[in-house]
Amino acid sequence: MEKAGFDAYYVGGAVRDFLLNRPIGDVDIATSALPEEVKSVFPKTVDVGIEHGTVLVIWRGDGYEITTFRTESDYKDFRRPEKVAFVRTLEEDLKRRDFTINAMAMDRHGAIIDPFDGKTALQLRQIQTVGEARERFSEDALRMMRAARFVSQLGFQLHPKTEEALSRCAHLLQHIAVERKLMEMDKLLAGKEVTAGLRVLVNGGLLAYLPGLTGKEQLIDQMLSYDLSRLTARQNWLFLLVLLAPDQPGDWLKEWRMPAKKIKYLAGTYEWFLKVQEVDWSAFSLYEAGIERAADAEAVSALYAGRPPRAEELKRQHEALPIKNRKELAITGKELKEWKHETGGPWMKQYLEMIERAVVQKKVENRKDKIKEWLEACNLL
Ligand code: ATP
Ligand code: MG
């Protein structure tokens, strides 16, 4: 970029994480070049958000989001603006960013540009808005959730002024699209200080504006007494279901606009959680649930009951299963039809299920001849 006569800097999360010695997620670059100019410099680019000035550059196999210096104006309805204006200086670009720790830039030589003293905030481990907190939260109310998720991810605390503004502006969160809330909630639940992050939501009064959490302050308070850092984000979602116990877990998750696949996974795993509260894992239930679901349900179950998790034990049990899915069965409907001299029909499904169960429970070895013998012994052939 610079060879072509433009300024370019690393900005945002990558600079913050670099200074914190944390693993760097996506690398964002800010530049004085206009999107068309960026595209003319690099051979391979993808228009990912050209209306916001962002071009994805593929360079030596890695992707970099390069965004033209911009300001945001015309904040409407407490949401991110529709309109952006390109500017020619880095400082103006940094000014629109949410928190001082996210408003630093670094040039190619490692020099830090830090007009809002993000470095001190990093040392103090503080989340502080760039500029007046109430104003910034009113411009885009999602920033309040972002504050909570950075508390969770980084283990930082809110600056007192930022905290106060958050309490006052909490109600503005109602204007924010659920999809954006979900993205921040996912990151919050994955953080190592998830309890502290959730506490920001509770204390700041943000809970009232989150799907399915209105009026659930007490339950979330209860959740905070557990060591949630032992759980993954997915397991924390599951734990939320366990504590809230909605009549229709699928509908509750749907309110969050989660992808259908994830809803199915979580609602199904919740069912398993309930089942194994009643009766412990058996070989067959472990087989049916699969190790992923079993491990998630088990982690939550152990935390809930205050006992050490048995993840390793379950994993060993699962590995010891004779088969992991029906496809591994030594016979199919084809053999059954031959053996019984019958045409296919609903009976086949019943037979297969019975054989599957017997194999998993080690009542019969998973071999064609053994299964045939077993069926004969049961007078089924
Ligand atoms: P992560 O490591 O989780 O990606 P990040 O800080 O990079 O964290 P992103 O959501 O990827 O967070 O955003 C990149 C940068 O864009 C932020 O560091 C911040 O400077 C700016 N930013 C993102 N969202 C907002 C917002 N709603 N308001 C103001 N600035 C924002
Ligand atoms: Mg990022």
Image (cartoon, rainbow, N blue to C red):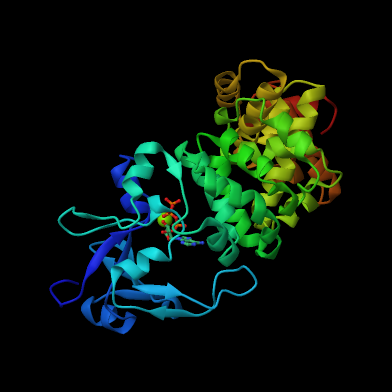
Query: Residue 311's image quarter?
Result: top right
Query: Position of 21 compared to 313: left or right?
Result: left
Q: Could you tell me which quadrant the N terminus lies in?
A: bottom left
Residue 236: image x %, image y %?
A: 63, 37
Figure quadrant of residue 189 = top right
Q: Residue at x 44, y 76 (%)?
A: 52
- Which residue is drawn at the image coordinates 60% and 22% (left, top)? 314
Say if residue 273 shows up in the picture: yes
Out of 67 and 59, give the one closest to the viewer. 67
* In the image, farthest residue toward the top: 307
**57 horizontally vs 153: left or right:** left
Q: Looking at the picture, does residue 186 appear above or below residue 298?
A: below
- The answer to whether residue 111 is left or right of residue 188 is left
Which of 358/170 is in front? 170
Residue that appears at 58% across and 53% down: 144
| Image quadrant in which the C terminus is located | top right
Q: Quadrant of ligand 1?
A: bottom left
Image coordinates for residue 239, horizontal then vertical, percent: 69, 35
Residue 303 against residue 45 in the figure, above or below: above
At which x and y percent is residue 286?
68, 29
Camera sees residue 341: no
Q: Position of residue 23 (x, y in %)?
A: 34, 43
Q: How many marks?
A: 0
Residue lying farthest to the left in this orientation: 3
